[in-house]
Image (tube, rainbow, N blue to C red):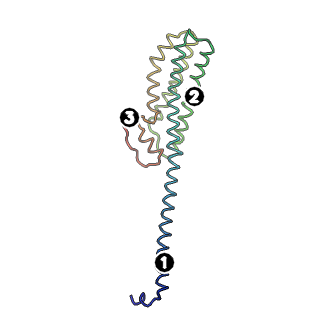
Amino acid sequence: MKIVGNLKIRTKLAIVFSAIIAVFVAGFALVYLSLAKINDGTTFIYTRGLIGTDKLIEADRDAYQSSIAIAFALLHSGAADQATLDADFKNIDENLGQIQERFSVFEKLYSETGFAKTDDFGIFSQNYASLVKLTDKIKALYKAGSVSEAKSLYLGEYVPVFDTMRFHEQPYGQHAGEHRQALSGKSRPVPVDP
């Protein structure tokens, strides 16, 4: 204490202000690093989570639109001109292709997180392949004039495969918690009941 008492007031003030400035600089550095980490996390959530979820929603919408286009084609049988039927078949093909295109973007984003793929990816792929084959059969039957067989196939085999594929592609499917956790960069999956 004697050393502090012997210092000049100017030196004491310099030491106190230097300590205050050091605390301020350390606090500023800590805040800056924390903000940088928050910014990185936000960027990661946007580039993985939001874009991935958006692609899943778009793929789900495309699947639904493809199914609706098939239903419209079947409803138009005999009552529509060739241009309407051609437009229906074009919509079927475009939407069917966009399902896989958009789901592939989600799958790539998911893989970039480093998490293992869930069973949903395989189930989706199997059912998508089945859906493409069934759609081709429905179109072939329709073009061959077997509209009633095409309707039976649509209402029989197509709908259950379609429903299963959609369940495993949409962000609210069986493993949605794992998908959201992986896309947001979290380390543990959160179970979510469908």
Q: CA distance from mark 3 to mark 2?
A: 27 Å
Q: Quadrant of the N terminus?
A: bottom left
Front-most of 31 and 127?
Answer: 31
- Residue placed under numbered mark 3 in the picture: 194
Disc 1 marks a residue whose amino acid type is: Phe
Badge nearest the viewer, 1 or 2:
1
Front-most of 1 and 180?
Answer: 1
Measuring from the top left, give residue 47's x and y in whole percent: 54, 45
Residue at image position (42%, 42%) is 178
Note whether 135 is above or below 16 in the view shown.
above
Note whether 38 is above or below 2 in the view shown.
above
SS for callout 2: helix
Disc 1 vs disc 2: Cβ atoms closer than 8 Å?
no
Q: Earlier in the sequence, mark 1 or mark 2?
A: 1
Quadrant housing residue 84:
top right
Note whether 119 is above or below 17 in the view shown.
above
Disc 3 vs disc 2: Cβ atoms closer than 8 Å?
no
Q: CA distance from mark 1 to mark 2?
A: 68 Å
Measuring from the top left, give residue 50's x and y in whole percent: 50, 42
Q: CA distance from mark 3 to mark 1?
A: 60 Å
Q: Earlier in the sequence, mark 3 or mark 2?
A: 2
Disc 3 marks a residue whose amino acid type is: Pro
Measuring from the top left, give residue 167's x and y in whole percent: 44, 30
Residue at image position (40%, 47%) is 188
Disc 2 marks a residue whose amino acid type is: Gly
Residue at image position (49%, 85%) is 11
- Residue placed under numbered mark 2 in the picture: 97
- Residue placed under numbered mark 1 in the picture: 17
